[in-house]
Amino acid sequence: MNWVLASVGILVILLGIAIWRFGLVGWLSNVPKGGEIIDKEKAARLGGGYLGLLGICFIAFGYAVENLPNQTIMVIVACYIPVNMVILVSYLVAQSKNMRR
């Protein structure tokens, strides 16, 4: 396993858990400081869940880099990028519905 990717993945997962568990929505860059949050728990759950998913992907990439051939890794990365963009946009839309303007 590529330990750099695995370490980054573990750190991102821990950050997601901290945001989710302790409601640290101020750590999220897409939550405005002056804006009003309708449901703080939902905002923390969404942010923490997305970061947890991202951390798991980093760990999976670390495994793939060490154990799979290069062509397979390129296919995985080529599929991951559009899927991650769709997940990111859906996270941002869900988070924006949780804000008052």
Image (cartoon, rainbow, N blue to C red):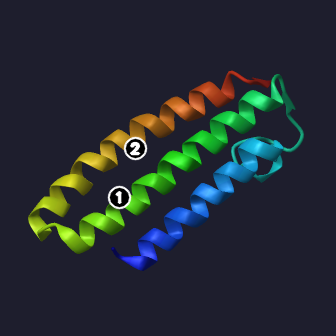
Mark 1, mark 2: which one is toward the viewer? 1
Q: Residue at x 68, y 35 (%)?
A: 45
Placement of 51 over or under 95, stated as above or below: below
Q: Residue at x 41, y 62 (%)?
A: 59
Which quadrant holds the N terminus? bottom left
Q: Position of residue 88 (x, y in %)?
A: 49, 39
Local packing at callout 1 (Cα closer than 10 Å; few below 14, some 14-19, many 20+) is: some
- Give me the disc on residue 86: none
Considering depth in this image, is 101 or 31 the residue closer to the camera?
31
Considering depth in this image, is 29 or 6 the residue closer to the camera?
6
Side of 39 where 2 appears, left or right: left
Local packing at callout 2 (Cα closer than 10 Å; few below 14, some 14-19, many 20+) is: some
Side of 83 where 28 appears, left or right: right
Side of 44 where 40 appears, left or right: right
Residue type (three-letter) at the residue carrying disc 1: Ala
**What is the C-alpha distance between the residues marked 1 and 2?**
14 Å
Reading the image, the residue beneath label 2 is 84
Reading the image, the residue beneath label 1 is 60
